[in-house]
Amino acid sequence: MNSLAPMTQPSLSVPNDDLSRRCLEQACLTTARVTRRLAGGVKRPIEVAGYPFSWGAIAERQEPGLLVWEFYLEDALSRFESGGRRLDELQALLFESLEARLDCVSRSFVVGCAGSLGLDAMPWVFVPGGLANGVILGLVCKYLDNRNCREWLCAEFIPRILPESVREAASRAFQLH
């Protein structure tokens, strides 16, 4: 884990966890503990089916014809909150960063309708997560394309794109503050 920078701008790097990445790539589902954020600032630990990482977890679930991964960026969110920032701010800034890097980003919330997410034109797409549950972002994939998506997540997104995007979001958040 990287050390914290001064309190005004915490370091929000996302470490590379080889074992969890291999489990995700091989679909060896396990249990991960995450924090559900409830109204009034109440936090409740829960367990989800997914992949634990030192920075949080990726929950995995199936919808008809789709595979959905939900990203719990526990470490980044805790540090973000301790710096006086809110979950919705982190999500908005993270999405701006992802939109600048990737073509597969949509702000649509309609998970059950693949066409509304742009899945007619691409095999997977990032969507905003349910803030009420502490999910920063979700990744929706056509079930038939999940093998390629898993490989891309493990080879590109988790080790490179996610940390860069989280760092950029944090930098912009604390410049605005």
Image (cartoon, grey):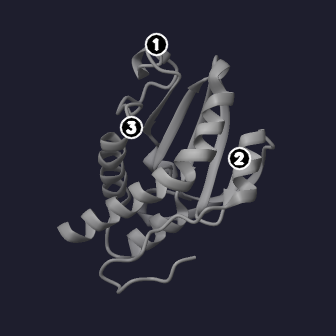
Residue 18, visible in the rendered structure: yes
Q: Nearer the viewer, mark 3 or mark 2?
A: 3
Q: Nearer the viewer, mark 1 or mark 2?
A: 1
The residue that appears at 54% across and 30% down in the rendered structure is 140
Q: Which residue is mark 3?
A: 102
- Residue 44 locus on image (x, y percent): 60, 62
Q: Residues within 10 Å of mark 2 (few under 14, many from 20)?
A: many
Q: Is residue 167 left or right of residue 54?
A: left
Disc number placed over residue 21 in the picture, else none: none
Q: Which residue is mark 1?
A: 120
Tell me the CA gap for discs 1 and 2.
26 Å
- Residue 113 locus on image (x, y percent): 48, 16
The residue that appears at 50% across and 26% down in the rendered structure is 111
Tell me the CA gap for discs 3 and 2.
24 Å
Above or below, 82 against 100 in this view is below
The residue that appears at 56% across and 43% down in the rendered structure is 70
Q: Hey, what amino acid is under mark 1? A: Asp
Question: Regarding mark 2 in the picture, which secondary structure is present there?
Answer: strand
Q: Hey, what amino acid is under mark 3? A: Leu
Image quarter where the N terminus lies is bottom right
